[in-house]
Amino acid sequence: MVAAVHERFGRIDILVNNAGTGRSAPFFKTDLEMWNQLLALNATSMYLVTQAVMKGMVERKYGRVINIVSTAGKIPFRYCTAYVASKHAALGFTRALALEVAGSGVTVNAICPGWVGSTGLFEETIANIVKTTGRDATVAVKSLADMSPQKRVMEPEEIAHVALMLASDEAAGINGQGINVCGGSVMD
């Protein structure tokens, strides 16, 4: 993947790491396979792709790494221990790497969305709630929206606007941050 981008464009200046799943389970129903899968998807993949592009960014003294994490990287949620652990790992990776490359012209930040509607991940999460709780899908959506003081889920475009800002030259002074886009459900 990285080689194909290098071949076509010559370099990578901006990397957005965005992978996720709605898969989760309470601790006593989480097996090692799920634990490893969530860490691989939410943390290890971020490390591997970033490692493949970071050297070039540092050599060119310019780069923006934007990791899509989750509010679960900042606060715990019940019944999804492995997911929360993987998102904490992703945010910790973001912050530690930001310190390592500080002063090189490269910034590393995270966007921590709350629930984001209109995505396959959201639909997967709703299906999981319906399956495990027996709730109606409409009730499940409302319960997630009600977690936000704005009583709504975020839209993908809201996350995209923050990513565009972080990718800009004007964001050179923003480094190591986890920016919440959650309607106020997490404030730090």
Image (cartoon, helix red, strand yellow):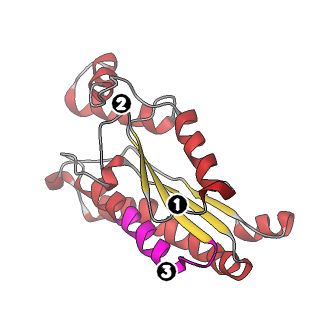
Dot 3, how many residues are within 10 Å of its Cα: few (below 14), some (14-19), or many (20+)? few
Callout 1 crowding tier (Cα within 10 Å): few <14, some 14–19, many ≥20: few
Instruction: Please report contact status of discs 3 and 1: CB closer than 8 Å, yes or no.
Output: no
Q: Pick whichever of labels 3 and 2 is earlier in the sequence.
A: 3
Asked whether, in this view, residue 156 is left or right of residue 115, the answer is right
Identified at 37% across, 33% down, the residue is 183
Q: Residues within 10 Å of mark 2 (few under 14, many from 20)?
A: many
- Which numbered disc flags the more N-terminal residue, 3 or 1? 3
Q: Which mark is residue 126?
A: 2
Tell me the residue that label 3 is attached to: 100
Foreground mark, 1 or 2, reads: 1
- Kindly report the secondary structure that dominates the magenta region of the rendered protein: helix
The quadrant in which residue 126 appears is top left
Q: Which residue in the structure is indicated by mark 1?
A: 174
- Quadrant of the rendering where the N terminus is positioned: bottom right
Residue 126 shows in the view: yes
The residue segment tinted magenta is 89-105
- SS for tag 1? loop
